[in-house]
Image: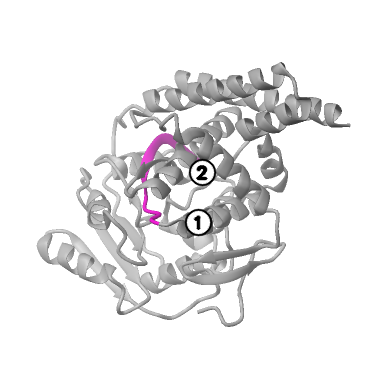
Amino acid sequence: MAYGLGLAFGLLTITGCIHWIVAAWLIGRLGRETPPASVPDTPVVILKPLHGAEPGLRENLMSFISQDYAGPTTVVFGVQDPHDPAIPIVEDIIRTTPERGMTIVVDSRQHGSNPKISNLINMISKVPDAIVVLADSDIRVERDYLSRIAATLQRPGVGAVTFAYHGRATQALWSRLSSAAIDGHFLPNVIVGVLTGLAAPCFGATIALRGDVLDRIGGFAAFSNVLADDYAIGRAVRRLGLTVEVSLSPVTHMCNEATLGELVAHEIRWAKTVANVDRIGFLGSGITHVIPLSVVTAVLLKSPPGILLIVATFLCRCLLLQAVARRFNVKAVSVWLLPIRDFFSFYIYLISFLPSRVRWKGRDFMIEADGSMIARRGSK
């Protein structure tokens, strides 16, 4: 019995290694996006929902303000708590950069259970006749970010633009583990999914679409009770017969987790979001946890080939992470951190199958089968 299970786990492990080798090969062949030949000067409205003053917030926000873009740009910052520590940072940016069109909206009204969407609804009273850019506060971009968006949205049939992202740690161990998950699992899987046509993602870290498209999908109010609001926005755009272009020149996700509790809460919410969007795909992603699977195989087989499989999976993962580091010019995950990260990812994967409760911005929510969120009683 144990030997048969060992063979089964060994087969899963080998399949996962093949997946990562293919991912490394695709990353190595991935071309670099060329600068757009022509960029329209369409007006742009950037919406920045904020919650707290995480490390590097000012630098993150300034990367959106300091864009090399010829068209008129308005930046709207939104908070729901009048005592939010992000407010003084935003007020200082507005005061010291008066030549930029910026405003801050402080509004505590709730519109459904999704706190981010509630914030966005408060920030924008009507859909503008412009490109609308949504970007999380922990995202940092290059100076050609808006130019790339505007050029892509002028292509026929394109309804929205979204960006993959890589991680950069701002804290000690826990944020480094968060960054390692992005660079070692999320980003390679996105590249494989997009290039093979197996995935049609839309990432809430940054989404851009024309105002008329946002209006046609029902505005932000249509997503006020949905956990995976980014995926739902992308799906709604595609239902119009338009495409969602995924840029594989990633923006930077600043990883700010300062404690184990923050890391676990964030990754469980992320895992449950992915599972809700694509249950079969999420179940199949279990094969990507090759180091833990190889250890299980070795324990069950109790033979030298099991030990060799552990070594092979470790080398396979190192190959992938080096490919990511070279292609995207990011710091590779430390060798000693790799097995810790992979076992932690496997743990998150397993517990994500437990009853659907997530914690988001200090509140607890239950997740229904249709992906809607319901705030738990007593959660504020």
SS type, badge 2: strand
Is residue 380 visible in the rendered image? The answer is yes
The residue shown at (47%, 53%) is 204
| Residue 277 falls inside the magenta stretch | no
Reading the image, the residue beneath label 1 is 266
Reading the image, the residue beneath label 2 is 244
Residue 236, position as x, y percentages in the image: 58, 54
| Residue 247 falls inside the magenta stretch | yes
* Above or below 64: residue 157: above
Q: Is residue 246 left or right of residue 331?
A: right
* Above or below 141: residue 222: below
User: Residue 211 lies in what quarter of the image?
Assistant: bottom left
Q: CA distance from mark 1 to mark 2?
A: 26 Å
Region in magenta: 244-258
Residue 273, position as x, y percentages in the image: 60, 54
Residue 362, position as x, y percentages in the image: 47, 70
